[in-house]
Amino acid sequence: MSDVVHRRSVETLVMQAYLQLVLVAWDESGSRAISLAKYGNYEVRLLEVKSADPVEMPHLWVELYGNDVQAPIDACGCDDIEAAAMAAEHVMSQAKQLAQGESEPPARHVTQ
């Protein structure tokens, strides 16, 4: 698949997931999540977070979640859907490599 087609597919996936988030209940921590993709024990999720200060903390996050450890491994904060799509592309690649045993999980890492 060409890079352009792949990027557009990821953008469409993120947009659809974002629209579906309204159907997901907020959890006790003030966030809600929906799965974008699964690779073995790794899941790429789109999270929306209620923030007391939206200027300081992004409201959208793309998270690499380890189902085997039941914890997030990596997360990227995003200001908009376009940034979330770019982050999702990166995190999906990371998840795929981890599932194929090509790399080690990073130490817990969060970026904004």
Image (tube, helix red, strand yellow):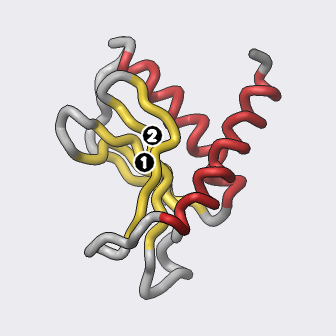
| Sequence-first tag of 1 and 2 | 2
| Residue name at image x 31 percent, y 42 percent | 73
Which of 4 and 34 lies nearest the eye of the viewer? Answer: 34
| Residue name at image x 28 percent, y 45 percent | 108
Q: Judge from the rendering whether residue 66 lies leftward or rightward of residue 80; answer left or right.
A: left
Q: Judge from the rendering whether residue 110 lies leftward or rightward of residue 1; answer left or right.
A: left
Residue closest to the far left: 69
Marks 1 and 2 close (CB-CB < 8 Å): yes
What residue did someone put label 2 on? 44
Q: Quadrant of residue 44?
A: top left
Task: Answer above or below: position of 72 versus 93.
Answer: below
Quarter of the image where the N terminus is located: top right
Q: Where residue 4 sits in the image (x, y, percent)?
A: 82, 28
Q: Where residue 76 sits in the image (x, y, percent)?
A: 48, 52
Q: Amino acid at mark 1?
A: Glu
| Residue name at image x 57 percent, y 42 percent | 88
Task: Answer above or below: position of 109 versus 58.
Answer: above
Task: Answer above or below: position of 19 versus 36.
Answer: below
Q: Where residue 40 sits in the image (x, y, percent)?
A: 35, 22
Residue closest to the far front: 23
Q: Which mark is residue 4?
A: none
How busy is the neighbourhood of tag 2: few (under 14 within 10 Å), some, or many (20 plus)?
A: many
Q: Amino acid at mark 2?
A: Val
Which of 37 and 52 lies nearest the eye of the viewer? Answer: 37
As helix, strand or loop, the secondary structure at mark 2 comes to: strand
What residue did someone put label 1 on? 63
Q: Where residue 57 sits in the image (x, y, percent)?
A: 48, 73
How busy is the neighbourhood of tag 1: few (under 14 within 10 Å), some, or many (20 plus)?
A: many
What is the CA distance from the residue labelled 1 to the residue labelled 2? 6 Å
| Residue name at image x 63 percent, y 48 percent | 14
Which of 79 and 28 lies nearest the eye of the viewer? Answer: 28
As helix, strand or loop, the secondary structure at mark 1 comes to: strand
